[in-house]
Amino acid sequence: MKITLLPSDKGDCLLIEAGSVTILADGGMPGSYASEVRGYLGKWAEDTGKQLDLVYVSHVDQDHIAGVLQLLEDTVQWRVFDHKHASGQSSGKPPFRRPPRVKRIWHNAFKLMVDESEAIGTVLAARANTLSSSANPSLLRLADAFRSIANSIPEAIKVSRRIAADQLNIPLNGEFGKLLAMVRGHEVISLAANSSLAIRVIGPFEKDLEALRKYWKNWLSNPKKAGSLRDLEEWLEENDGPIPPGFGVSIDDELGHRKDVTEPNLASLMLLLEEPKASGGVTRVIMTGDGHADDILAGLTHHGRLADGAGLHVDVLKLQHHGSEHNLHRAFARRITADHYLICANGKDKNPDLRVLEVLLDSRLGVADKLSPNAEAGQPFTIWLNCSTHYLDKQQAAYIAKKGTRSTELDKNIAHMKAVEALLAEAKQQNPGRLKLKSLKASPLELEV
């Protein structure tokens, strides 16, 4: 199995090749797709002759779905060109390589959730604008989250339109009876008759999608009650600022609060990929989207991969939600260990969170009471970052050349990624031979397992 970590700005975009089956997991942000992913996928398709057996959108947030929409728009442009060329009409080729054919898509579209998706986007955008005038850092972060979801809603609607039968005619959720993609019993999904790759959906469960459905409807039907802006501001004012010292606060008090994860993230489509190894055993990869640790554990337990109180060691774990502090806690890091940890983040929103990295390192390199009890925990492991300060510095140089000034947002991202790299470099130096680090410099990172 080969996993390519494609540049995705603050989002996710991974190409998975398992024998004859290929999967694109999310598409990242529109800018990173146009500048990096588009050319890579076009050349990959041209060189290998392969198609994408599955494109799956883990959830609706813009940093996951926007690149997928651009892939579909590029496909439309090439189909228009082919039609005109075949009918003898004059038409210039699109200014980019032909994208790979998409055979199927898994995506929990808004139209399958609620009918009022466009109105929801309007409400979220208005609230984001209101929050943006606040001086409270927590409210500003929330405004950014609302704005991202508001932007992603029209993109999600366009994805649904493009894959419809009268346009690109790409099957949606066919393996789920054209219904919502979620945990349904203990099914094992195969994407090709000659493939040994087994796919198990470990999230979301029906209750997570129902919670998301209610979340959207509450935005429209009851804006002055639960979840209203006024109540939110009052809560943040009461809980703003650091907790006073001397109250026994630790990293474990700060991480993994499921209530702080947005409903769209909690409804992430999450997969367990399993493929027999030629040497015996099974290659296992956990794809987590922006899901929460507790839900990943529940999904693995549901499929019999995790016994009560036991742990699981896998080949690859895609760290959930870009290493955010809300989605991972110490118990998860101790129970689920991996040979390779993939982190898709570029410093935006201070992801990956330094506390999350510390807990992750503790589970493999720490003192006895913080180490994972998994038998494989003492083995060497690798942390993969699909970004680096080197990569961001190049982006900053390009921004300066174009705008004549520095990007303050890029400066913030660079500062955080410097802290990330320093933390990981120190851990590597103190544990020679135990920890390897891979980060994006120029070409996309390729992991073979």
Image (tube, grey):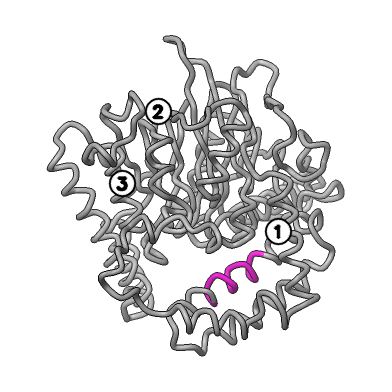
Decide whether residue 146 is among the magenta residues: yes
Instruction: Please check the rendered image and state whether residue 17 is part of the magenta-colored stretch, yes or no.
Output: no
Residue ID for mark 1: 212
**Disc 1 to disc 3, how far (Cα)?**
34 Å
Which residue corresponds to mark 2?
Answer: 448
Three-letter code, disc 1? Leu
- Residue 90 seen in render: no
Give the residue type that dot 3 points to.
Answer: Ser
Q: Would you call the spot at circle 3 few (<14 residues within 10 Å), some (14-19), or many (20 or more)? A: some
Residue 325 percent across, percent down from the top left: 42, 58
Q: Residue at x 50, y 46 (%)?
A: 293
Q: Secondary structure at mark 3?
A: strand
Query: Across the whole image, how many numbered discs are drawn on residues?
Result: 3
Chain part drawn in magenta: 143-152
Q: Is residue 119 left or right of residue 435?
A: right
- Residue 294 x, y percent position in the rendering: 53, 46
Q: Which residue is mark 3?
A: 439
Q: Residue furthest front?
A: 247
In the displayed structure, does residue 156 sit left or right of residue 326? Answer: right
Tag nearer the camera, 1 or 2: 1
Write down the quadrant of residue 404 in the picture. bottom left
In x, y percent, where is residue 418?
Answer: 24, 60
**Counting other residues with Cα less than 10 Å from the Cα at mark 1, is it few (<14), some (14-19), or many (20 or more)?**
many
Closer to the chain start, of discs 3 and 2, is 3
Indicate which disc, 1 or 3, sits on the residue closer to the N terminus. Answer: 1
